[in-house]
Amino acid sequence: MSKVVLKTENLGISFGGLKAVQNLDLEIKEKQLYGLVGPNGAGKTTVFNMITGVYKPTTGKFFLDGEDLTGKGQEAINHKGIARTFQNIRLFNNMTVIRNVLVGLHNQPEFKCSMVESIFRLPRHFKTEKAMRERAKEILRIVGLEDERNNLSCNLPYGKQRKLEIARALATSPKLLCLDEPAAGMNPNETADLMSIVRRIRDEYNVTILLIEHDMKFVSGLCDEITVLNFGTVLAQGSPEVALNDPEVIKAYIGG
Amino acid sequence: MKAQKHIKWSHYINYVVIAVATIVLGALSIAGVLPASYQIILENIAIAITLAVSLSMVVGFLGELSLGHAGFMCVGAYLGGKTVYVLAPIIGEIPALICGFIVGGTLAAVCGIIIGLPALRLRGDYLAIVTLAFGEIVWSIFMNTSEKSFGGALGMPTVRIDRDYLFVIALVVVLLCLAVTQNLIRSKHGRAITSIRDNEIAARATGINVTKYKLAVFAISAFFAGVAGVLLASSNYTVQSQKFNYNYSIEILVMVVLGGMGNINGSIIAAALITFLDIKLQTVLTGELAVLQDLVYAAILIVIVIYNNAPGLKGFREKYNIKNILAKLRKKNFDPSKSRDDEAKWDRVPTKIQMDEVLSVDVQVKSPYDPDKAGKGDN
């Protein structure tokens, strides 16, 4: 069996008296496509916010490749290898598409270049900039935005903005890529396109992908395993066919 | 070298203009043709440009509103000016001035880091208040020093460097400041800084070290403000602490805003014009008309701002925009998607941010009741 990339143990958070998420145990294996689904307000994005360091969990721990990252800051967690996209898109709007990806490449060890080297324009500055642009173009090619690279990111259509967010997250070369509703607001063609992109990313970059999605076709077509949340607790876990047909899950979605 | 094929000369036009101006005016000054009043105007313009360029790093590129720039300048003027005063009889004026730049700039940079620390927690209006308070505190401290140390209310005596060449030194400082600022902004670090301005939450999630960059920008900006302070001290016989009150900080901010946020060349032009206007008004409107100085100054500023921003004048602006006229002359319109490659303009900072964006308080980062994330998050 392949090794576990992300493991959460009894993870939970409460805001005052509200237990937003409790007793969450996840085990995501290498190169897995893992789905996190649930009705509105179930706590899915809160889980993302915990494992990317936006919130500090009040109970439990989580591990990336066996290393405890609980309570670390957002930057530190990103450096360790968890990258994310946002549900309400957060791009660098005043920058061109390629610059957005270049910011993602900022911390890669192969593109190290100190501030002094940049200010004095030492040779390494030019070498790094050139290499960074090459890499950024390569990443943009995967999500199909290479031709848009000189446009301002705020001028892109919605679907492309989502892809650009994925590209920026991918540029930080994560071990675990967290996608928050990547297909929201996309038409069926774009969704199908996105599914193939997500698969390609997983295969070419060897990343594990955790995604939140409401589009059940997308989830069941893509994910190897899912967890269904409702009111912060786990309703069902397992393969999409099994978990989505669980009577508890159907009850949570349809009522009854 | 391969990279040189893609150098865009418009990036360097400001260096060329200032360097040529320095050489020509310096030569005129040595020949004894340049009138003293112009030498003084040039000194003041160079100081204003240094201040505007350094402040535009914080306001235009980092996106934080700082109202205490005169405070950093005050630190440089007093401590650097004192260094020049003490060292000048021993090692000569010019070496003493260089020592003054280093001492004044470094101490101002230390203050910049100290004021940058709260900047990590505060945003927008709140940071503006903290920096405003800092500026007021600094000049009040020097105001209350004893006569022997920093002169107190009487002002601190300084060495007046010969005005035949002080403006040349000042313009060289401008070039240095410009080089450091532009090279930093047009690098991966500059991208990181502008990413913090555009979306701090996303910048953090992308692994940008926000703490490091905020402190670095505050320190570099304060360093050059301190150097400008030393220049100011050397262009007068005394330093008066009252000069560095919030009015002066606002004046620098006006230069940056008029020039366009995140637009270095704009800041340079605005700084030069405003300083020129200010000094000219002071010399033209004398005697009974002196009361009109501030009024005319303010009226001109209001007209410029209205001209630049009024929606009603949009058609007029576009018709007479230099860029558009040039494009028409060349008979090609600028279209980013059709341009040759990103190589040429990868380091362009594309838009000017609006003042209300700078002032708005973005989402607080660690609040668990963040409506943007906690509320809408699971829709």
Image: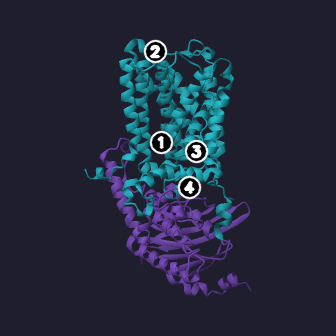
Chain colours: A purple, B cyan
Residue A55's x, y, as percent? 61, 59
Residue B121's x, y, as percent? 61, 46
State the residue position of label 3: B64
Mark 3 on the same chain as mark 2: yes
Disc nearer the start of the sequence (2/1): 2
User: Mark 4 and 1 residues: CB-CB less than 8 Å, in contact?
Assistant: no
State the residue position of label 1: B265
Cα gap from disc 4 to disc 1, whole angstroms: 24 Å
State the residue position of label 4: B199
State the residue position of label 2: B86
Residue A16's x, y, as percent? 72, 60
How busy is the neighbourhood of tag 1: few (under 14 within 10 Å), some, or many (20 plus)? some
Q: Is residue A131 above or below residue A181?
A: above
Residue B16's x, y, as percent? 37, 38
Describe residue A214's horizontal placement relative to residue A102 as left or right: right
Instruction: Locate residue A47: give its quadrant.
Output: bottom right
Mark 3 on the same chain as mark 1: yes
